[in-house]
Image (spheres, grey):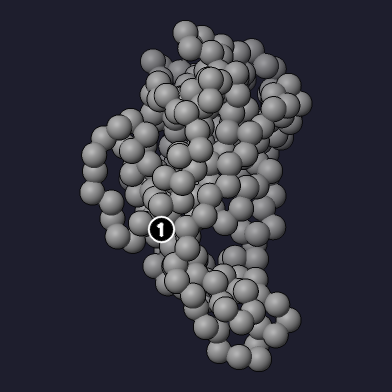
Amino acid sequence: MTFNYLEDFKRKNGYEIEGVWYPRVTAICDIIHKPGLLRYYAQQPNFAAAQESLNKAADWGNLTHSTIEALLSGEEIEIDPLIKPSIRAFDQWRSFHKIKPFGFEKKVISNKYFYVGTVDALVEIDGKVGILDLKTSSGIWDEYSLQTVAYFQALNEKDKIKAESRWILRIDQYQECLICGAKKREKEGKERINGGGKNFFSHSHQWGPIKGEYEFKEFDNHKQDLKAFLAAKKLWEWVNRNNLSKIDNYLGNKKQNILF
Ligand SMILES: [Zn+2]
């Protein structure tokens, strides 16, 4: 059997729903340049090791996601000791807000712009209904605003519950060097050290206790962000024009006239 590049492309970038193929929001957002990721790869011994670490980090993210979603929906669950500092940070965040959950891991489709995505949580926070996206990254990156606005648009095209807002809740945990302030994270199965002042190399780091932290951010410029997402999607379509033009059940080909 020969390797089918088109099928591989379709599988990696999207999936079919009722006979129609849609690209995933996250695949589209991958078109955005991530300088941090390049630096990350450069620090790894080789490509395979880098991939393995990223997979471990993804497992960590999944564990944190499922735990937080269970807690938000009121389930009593056992917390994995590995992520306890993160969950303590989450509990602290939660204690400051009034939260009502409507649903988790909700699939949303935009039939106006032809893409699909999965919303982590649809919730009401302090009286406002919106999309909550959980992240376990070490920062809130620009592409998150595009990712969340894409979900926001798709959800509001047809869902009975309309979102008014969108938020990122970033949960992270690390140990800080008591001397230089460098941060050590072990989410990738091995330690990764970032930051620290200019005396970084003058000492052996002294790690404090594992600390959890959270960052909560609301995005409010839906219109501007949607424009940027659609521009990113256009660019993604152009980059992948050869594959996309061969996908007969991708409606974006016909309705948006993207055949370059
Ligand atoms: Zn240090």
Q: Position of residue 149 (x, y in %)?
A: 62, 27
Q: Position of residue 92 (x, y in %)?
A: 46, 46
**Rendered-image quadrant of the N terminus:** top left
Q: Position of residue 80 (x, y in %)?
A: 28, 55
Q: Is residue 249 left or right of residue 30?
A: left
Residue 248 shows up from this direction: no
Taking depth in this image into account, of 27 and 203 the one nearest to the observer is 203
Q: Is residue 168 above or below residue 166?
A: below
- The residue carrying mark 1 is 85
Taking depth in this image into account, of 118 and 19 the one nearest to the observer is 118
Looking at the picture, which amino acid does disc 1 mark? Pro
Residue at (61%, 91%) from the top-left corner? 203
Residue at (70%, 34%) from the top-left corner? 232
Residue at (73%, 81%) from the top-left corner? 198
Residue 140 shows up from this direction: yes
Residue at (50%, 33%) from the top-left corner? 97
Crowding around mark 1 (Cα neighbors within 10 Å: few <14, some 14 to 19, many 20+) is some
Q: Is residue 178 above or below residue 92?
A: below
Q: Is mark 1 within 8 Å of ligand 1?
A: no
Q: Is residue 114 above or below residue 55?
A: above
Taking depth in this image into account, of 47 and 108 the one nearest to the observer is 108
- Name the element at disc 1: helix
Q: Position of residue 33 (x, y in %)?
A: 69, 49
| Quadrant in the rendering for residue 71 | top left
